[in-house]
Image (spheres, rainbow, N blue to C red):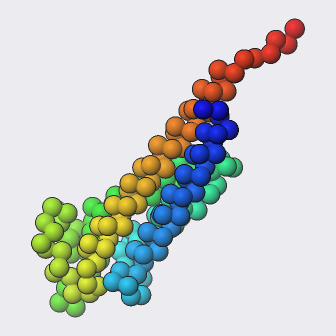
Amino acid sequence: MHPRKCAHWVGLSLISLSLVCIVANALLLVPDGKTWSSDQLSLQVLLMPGFIGGGLMEWCLPVCFIEGLLGAIYCLTMSAEGLRIGPKCSINGKWDYHFQRDEYLSHPDDWNICEEPSNVVSWNVTFFSLLVVVSSLEILLIFSGCCFTCIAVSDEPRSNPF
């Protein structure tokens, strides 16, 4: 594949993936389809890994691939941390990270203990998992696109300056 075609394919793929990240992050901000105050949302949601890292920083990729790579890594780490800690929810009127000490991902029967927002655990697991997968794909695309371009450019015949 010609380097320009590869760059075009990688660019279109990254734009599509960045839009997925932005939408997933927007949905994380409205668990249960309702708006909640910032003290009722987890820190990892408020840091907006999909919007900033997986989304906007990917649009900077034509300028500098390092920014796109750092954005995808930021999205991956913040989303993985959001999965590890679990959502912030209300149980008996107390808002906290109630799943932080448990291995809640392996016990889906316990996900319904949150009173507000309802279904927040499955909501966060779904969208943070999506962000982890998409940001991993972004990292692979950036590396493969960069490596392929470097290999293709180095294989081009060089003109003899003499």
Viewport quadrant of the C terminus: top right
Pick the front one: 83 or 109: 109
155 vs 144, left or right, is right
Residue name at image x 25 percent, y 79 percent = 119
Dividing the picture into quadrants, the one containing residue 46 is bottom left
Q: Is residue 157 above or below residue 100?
A: above
Q: Is residue 146 above or below residue 114?
A: above
Residue name at image x 42 percent, y 49 percent = 136
3 vs 114, left or right, is right
Dividing the picture into quadrants, the one containing residue 97 is bottom left
From the top left corner, tell me how far across and down residue 31 is, in percent.
35, 80
Dividing the picture into quadrants, the one containing residue 112 is bottom left
From the top left corner, tell me how far across and down residue 95 is, in percent.
27, 84
113 vs 16, left or right, is left
29 vs 16, left or right, is left
Q: Is residue 2 above or below residue 94?
A: above
Pick the front one: 77 or 7: 7
Question: Is any part of residue 124 visible from this angle?
Answer: yes
From the top left corner, tell me how far across and down residue 43 is, in percent.
39, 72
